[in-house]
C-alpha cells in the first residue's frame, strides 16, 4: 500500500513547524516514538531504574526480534546486538575481527573497500593498518560511481600481494544518492570465503534489507537516520555462522558469565557485543521506530523516498541555474547532494534554516577518496523521507532562487 502521507505528517510533530530535509543526518521521530521514551523515563523516576527495567523487560527483549524482522535475520533476534550508534557497531565488529584468533590478519593482508567509503570507517581501517601492518585497498568505481564488481573480483584474485581477508564498505555513502551493489559484493565475498562487513546506516529504514540476499557476515545501522529512531541508538547484526569465531574486543559481566575466579564464558549470541548499562528509554524508542517502518512497509517507503528525491533532482537541474546535482548511481536513494556555483554554503545553510528548512553541508572529508577523485567542493545535502511533500520541495527551490 502507498504511504498515507497526511497521516504520517500528522503523527510527526516536527512537520508542523519546519521543512525537514536532513533525514540522512537525523530524521524526525513520530509522536509515539517520543512518548515511548518519555513514558519509560517517567516510570524510572517513579519506581527506580532497575525496577523500571524489570517492569518492562518483556517489551525490551522484543527490540532485537523486531530489528531481525527489518533485516531478514533469525527471528529470535540472537544475531542482533543493540549499540549506541552505527560507528560503535561498525568498530565493535571491525576491531573484534582484527584480534580474533580465527580471523586476525597477518601483515600484508588486505582490506578492500570502496571509493565512496565514509570517513569514520576509513580512519578505522588506517588505524588497523598501522597496528597490524595490513593494507587498505580501494576498489575502483565503475562508470556509474558504484563499486566495480569486476575490479573487486580481480583484486581478490591477485597473487602478487597479500590475500584479502575482509571486504568492508558502505551501502549508501554519506555524500550522495548512490546505492552500492551490496548484494553483488556479498555474492563475491561468499564465493571466495571472505568476511563481509556492510555499513547500512543510510539504507536501514529507507530501502528493504535482507541479510541473506546481501550475503553479509555483519551489518550495522544507526537509529537516528531513516529509521526515525532516537539519537544514541544503533545495532549490529552478526551472522550466526561467524559469531563463535568473533570474540568481542571488550567484555563485561553481562556479555560473559564469570563462572570461576579464572574462567568466563562468552554469551553465544550477538549480545556478546553489548554492555550491561544501556539507555532503555532510547532503545524502546528505537524498537517502536523500527516497528513503524515495518508497518509502513519498506517497499512503500523506498518508492515514496526515491520518487521525491528524483523530483528534487529534476527541479534543481531545471530551475536553479547555479545548482549542480552531484549524485551518482544507476539506482539512487533519498539523499540529494548539490553544489551552488559562487555561493557561500554556510550562509545558504543559515538562510534556509531561518526560513524553516533543514538541510546539511557535507565537506569533502566525509568521503575523501570520492571527493578528491571527482574534485567535489563542499555540498548541500537535502535528504527526503516519506513524510516530506512536493510542496516542501517547491519551497526549497523558491528559497534557493531567492538567495541567488
Image (cartoon, rainbow, N blue to C red):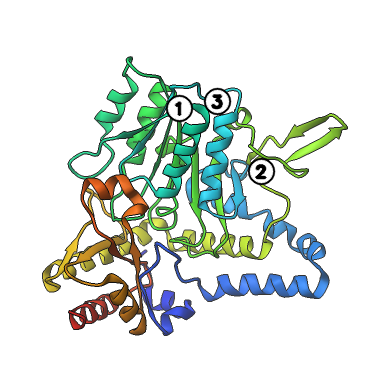
Instruction: Quadrant for residue 336, please give it.
Output: bottom left
Residue 177: x, y in percent?
Answer: 28, 55
Give the mark nearer the N terminus: 3 vs 2: 3
Instruction: Tell which of 129 and 191 is nearer to you.
Output: 129
Gap between marks 1 and 2 measured at Cα: 29 Å
Give the mark nearer the N terminus: 1 vs 2: 1
1 vs 2, front mark: 1
Gap between marks 3 and 2 measured at Cα: 21 Å
Instruction: Tell which of 240 and 168 is nearer to you.
Output: 168
399 vs 204, left or right, is: left
350 vs 271, left or right, is: left
Helix, strand or loop at label 1? It is loop
Residue 183: x, y in percent?
Answer: 36, 38
Crowd band around label 1 with a 10 angstrom C-alpha radius: few (<14), some (14–19), many (20+) = many
Classify 370 as above or below 279: above
Q: Residue at x 59, y 65 (%)?
A: 285
* Residue 389 visible in rendering: no
From the image, tell me which residue sits under label 2.
Answer: 271
From the image, tell me which residue sits under label 1.
Answer: 134
Residue 358: x, y in percent?
Answer: 37, 74
Instruction: Tell which of 286 and 143 is nearer to you.
Output: 143
Which residue ends up furthest to the top in the rendered image?
159
From the image, tell me which residue sits under label 3.
Answer: 104
Q: Residue at x 52, y 37 (%)?
A: 94
Amino acid at each position: 500500500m502507498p504511504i498515507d502521507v497526511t497521516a504520517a505528517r500528522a503523527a510527526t510533530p516536527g512537520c508542523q513547524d519546519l521543512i525537514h530535509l536532513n533525514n540522512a543526518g537525523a530524521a524526525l521521530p513520530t509522536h509515539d516514538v517520543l512518548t515511548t521514551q518519555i513514558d519509560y523515563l517517567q516510570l524510572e523516576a517513579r519506581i527506580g531504574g532497575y525496577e523500571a527495567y524489570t517492569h518492562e523487560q518483556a517489551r525490551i527483549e522484543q527490540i532485537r526480534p523486531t530489528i531481525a524482522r527489518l533485516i531478514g535475520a533469525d527471528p529470535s533476534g540472537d544475531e542482533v546486538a543493540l549499540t549506541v550508534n552505527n560507528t560503535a557497531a561498525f568498530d565493535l565488529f571491525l576491531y573484534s575481527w582484527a584480534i580474533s584468533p580465527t580471523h586476525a590478519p597477518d601483515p600484508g593482508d588486505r582490506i578492500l573497500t570502496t571509493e565512496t567509503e565514509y570517513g569514520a570507517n576509513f580512519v578505522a581501517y588506517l588505524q588497523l593498518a598501522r597496528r597490524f601492518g595490513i593494507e587498505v585497498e580501494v576498489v575502483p568505481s565503475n562508470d556509474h560511481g558504484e563499486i566495480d564488481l569486476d575490479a573487486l573480483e580481480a583484486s581478490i584474485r591477485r597473487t602478487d600481494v597479500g590475500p584479502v581477508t575482509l571486504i568492508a564498505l558502505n551501502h549508501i555513502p554519506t555524500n550522495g544518492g548512490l546505492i552500492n551493489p551490496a548484494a553483488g559484493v556479498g555474492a563475491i565475498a561468499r564465493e571466495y570465503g571472505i568476511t563481509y562487513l556492510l555499513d547500512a546506516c543510510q539504507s536501514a529504514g529507507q530501502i528493504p534489507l535482507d541479510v541473506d540476499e546481501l550475503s553479509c557476515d555483519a551489518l550495522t545501522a544507526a537509529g537516528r537516520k531513516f529509521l526515525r529512531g532516537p539519537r544514541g541508538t544503533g545495532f549490529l547484526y552478526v551472522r550466526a555462522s561467524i559469531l563463535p569465531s568473533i570474540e568481542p574486543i571488550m567484555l563485561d559481566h553481562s556479555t560473559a558469565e564469570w563462572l570461576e575466579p579464572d574462567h568466563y564464558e562468552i554469551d553465544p549470541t550477538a549480545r556478546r557485543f553489548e554492555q550491561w548499562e544501556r539507555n532503555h528509554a532510547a532503545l524502546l524508542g528505537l524498537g517502536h521506530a523500527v516497528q513503524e517502518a515495518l508497518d509502513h512497509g519498506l517497499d512503500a517507503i523506498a518508492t515514496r523516498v526515491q520518487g521525491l528525491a528524483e523530483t528534487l533532482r529534476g527541479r534543481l537541474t531545471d530551475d536553479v541555474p547555479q545548482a549542480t546535482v552531484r549524485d551518482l548511481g544507476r539506482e539512487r536513494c533519498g539523499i540529494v547532494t548539490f553544489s551552488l556555483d559562487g555561493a557561500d554554503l554556510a550562509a545558504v545553510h543559515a538562510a534556509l534554516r531561518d526560513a524553516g528548512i533543514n538541510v546539511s553541508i557535507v565537506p569533502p572529508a566525509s568521503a575523501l577518496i570520492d571527493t578528491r577523485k571527482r574534485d567535489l567542493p563542499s555540498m548541500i545535502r537535502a535528504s527526503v523521507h516519506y513524510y516530506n511533500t512536493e510542496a516542501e520541495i517547491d519551497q526549497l527551490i523558491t528559497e534557493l532562487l531567492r538567495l541567488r
